[in-house]
Image (cartoon, grey):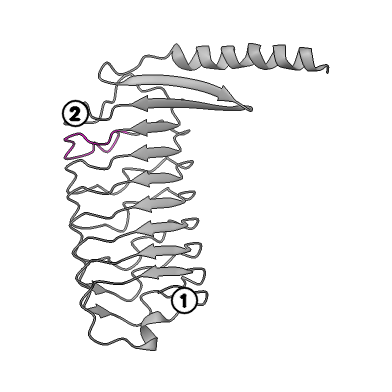
Amino acid sequence: MSTKVFLLAAFFFSHIFTGVHLSKPCPKQCSCHSSWLRGVSSVVVDCSKRGLTSIPTKGVSRYVTSLYLYKNFIASIHPQAFRGLRRLKELSLHSNQLSVIENGTFAGLRRLDRLYLFTNLLQGINNGVFQGLANLKTLYLHENLLRSIPPQSFKELKKLNLLTLHRNHIQVLHTGSMEGLHSVTSIFLHQNKIRKVENNAFAGCKNVVKLQLGINQLSNITKEMFIGLESLKEL
């Protein structure tokens, strides 16, 4: 195929796919745009800074790859809010008023790799909250009101690389709190109220290179606290 023919074909298909995406309705409170670059399509739905109290469920394209809902006044998420968004890769819900997220809320978002939940009012994490997020790479949970991390909270996140939990109110890291985080390389837990790390809290976290535990209330540090951290280089 000649260069000219290839460019014409690329132009043609980019307009076809862009047209398909843009032909879908856009929530009236949001702005939407799509693009086609190097054979990869992206559809962005931006609902940030709109004064929203709930997540728009009508008009969101099923082709959406990035959904921005940050800096609103959203206090809860309807269990079906993200139903059908199977191509979603990035979901930003930070800087809202979320206090609880129901189990299964993100089920079906199998392509999601970035989830932003920082600067909310989350007080706890249920074991099923992250169900279905098998491809998630980064999870931002800092600046919430979390007091504890129940065992197996992150067991679904087999491919997670980065976990931020700093600036919460965590007091104890229980045995199994970080269970399942086999791929994580960085965990941020600084600026909490951690006074105790139980044995095997980090069991299975063999790829963690960086662990931030500064500015906490630990009075006694033992080697048993770090069981499982085989690759740790920075503490």
Q: Left or right of 137: which side holds 164?
A: left
Kind of element beneath mark 1: loop
Residue topped by disc 2: 52
Q: Position of residue 9 (x, y in %)?
A: 70, 14
Q: Where is residue 13 in the image (x, y as percent from the top left)?
A: 63, 15
Residue placed at 32% from the left, 72% from the top? 213
Residues under numbered marks 1 and 2 in contact, where contact means CB atoms less than 8 Å apart: no
Residue placed at 52% from the left, 74% from the top? 231
Residue topped by disc 1: 229
Q: Can residue 91 be seen in this view?
A: yes
Check disc 2 and give the amino acid type.
Answer: Leu
Secondary structure that dominates the magenta span = loop
Q: How crowded is mark 1: few (under 14 residues within 10 Å), some or many (20 or more)?
A: some
Nearer to me, 56 or 119: 119
Q: Give the range drawn in magenta.
A: 69-81
Q: Where is residue 109 in the image (x, y as percent from the top left)?
A: 42, 40
Check disc 1 and give the amino acid type.
Answer: Leu
